[in-house]
Image (cartoon, rainbow, N blue to C red):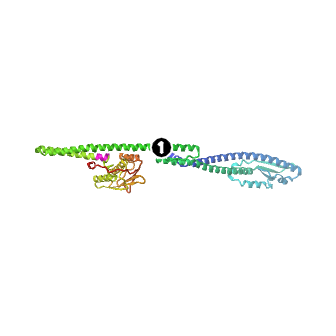
Amino acid sequence: MPGTTPRTARFGLWQRRSLRWQVMAAVVAINLCAALVAVVVIIANARRATETEILSSLAVAERFVQETVERLASADGAAGSLTQLPLHISGLRHVRIRIEDRAGNAVDIAPADDEEEGSEGEVPPWFARLVTVERQEMVIPIVENGAAVGQVRVAGEASDEIAEVWEDMSDLALLAIAVNIAILAALYIVLGRLLMPLRTLSAGLHELEAGRFEHRLSPPRVRELALIADRFNALGVALKAAGDDNARLNERLVSVQDDERRQIASDLHDELGPCVFGLRANLESIDRLAARAEPTLAQRMGERIATMTDILDRIQGLNRRLLRKIRPMALGHVPLAAVIADLVADFESHSPGRRVALATEGLAERYGDSVDITIYRCIQEAVTNALRHGGARNIAITLRGARLEGRLDLIIEDDGSGIAAGAPRGFGLIGMEERIGALGGVWRILPATPSGTRIEVSIPAHPCEFGLSAAPERLAAQ
């Protein structure tokens, strides 16, 4: 919904931050809230303390001024109290004193008020406005000989009290900032030490995801994280054992399938082949006998013999195709390069106008039945897909044997239409993947340049010693 998008985006931004950043940001936010609450409490307390202090100072100043006025009036008995009063009532805190004559004109007083004004100037105006309380003022008359000669105005002055509060709060704020910086620095270091094992654990999980089950973690110093590392290492051992068992089972499954295919191919070749050969020999014998019969019968027998011969040809062709599909009989009897070359030649003969190029390098004669048949099937499936589904005109096959590394590298690249995005894999590609995985190999499908498909296969393989023991008649019968 459009209304929830900003909130979701903010939540996602927070989630994308590291845990260290989130913890430190949370601490900073909590400290800012605490500082705001502390400022509110300090200002509220300062207002109450200032109001109490001003009222107390006004009461003290009133008594002091009243007593001073009375003392001067009784001592002089004349009009000297008004002029002498400023010399006796200076230096009072938290109050501002104004002495006025009968006409309301101000009489000079001591310079203490100027000092107070100077102290107020050091306080920021916004803080002074927050702490300042309602102004309190009282008037004390000056009486000489029974007549009022003037008056003293005593007003509460909070500037010096505000300055003290501001100074205390400034010192407290500096201390709080220093403490918070120290706490954040300690958190940064401690969280870094605590989160390092988690980053190591994440990297280890990535290794397990990639199939490298032999990866192990060093136990960290934190006990809880050390337990996690131990469980991770135990998981790696279990996955390694399961992977090894799975690889052995897959390899065994492929081996059993190849044995069954080899047995079926042998039965087709050894049992069906001689039967077809016997039928053909008998038909040839019948054809010679039919030549001795009367013309009409001979013609009818010849037609039947031709039909049966055509059926036998189709059976023999089907038998050859089944043998090639189930398992080429040449595998295990002739070098692998020759078998692949024969397969490429068969593709070119059945696909006029298409070019299939083969390049081999460093191949041994044989790598074992499982590896040989896997390479053969990969080439067969990839070229068939390129011709049938990709409409490729040119296909390049490169097969290299790396004896030192103990592997076979196969690259098949075509200039066809390629594989459509999101297209499901067929049974042929699934079979390739299962075979390659069972042998511990890897493979991938990439788009070719400028068009087409590129298939890369790498299989662990070691040459096998064997002698060329193919029976010429068996190979010729295919």
Residue 15 visible from this viewpoint: no
User: What is the span of residues highlighted in magenta in the rendered image?
Assistant: 321-326
Q: Main secondary structure of the magenta part?
A: helix
Report whether 280 appears left or right of 129: left
Secondary structure at badge 1 equals helix
The residue located at (75%, 45%) in the rendering is 52
Identity of the residue drawn at 27% across and 44% down? 270
The spot of residue 19 in percent (x, y) is: 56, 47
Residue 449 is drawn in which quadrant? bottom left
Most foreground residue, 372 or 22: 372
Q: Is residue 207 left or right of residue 130?
A: left
* Quadrant in the rendering for residue 253: top left
Residue 141 on the magenta segment: no
Out of 411 and 170, give the one closest to the viewer: 411
In this view of the protein, which residue sits in the foreground, 469 or 218?
Answer: 469
Residue 186 appears left or right of 335: right
Residue 386 screen position, x and y as percent = 34, 52
Type of amino acid at the residue the image marks with label 1: Leu
Q: Which residue is mark 1?
A: 239
Quick check: can you spot residue 56?
A: yes
In the picture, measured across the screen, residue 93 lies left or right of residue 206, that is right
Residue 325 highlighted magenta (yes or no) = yes
Residue drawn at x 62%, y 51% is 185
Of 394 and 33, the residue lying toward us: 394
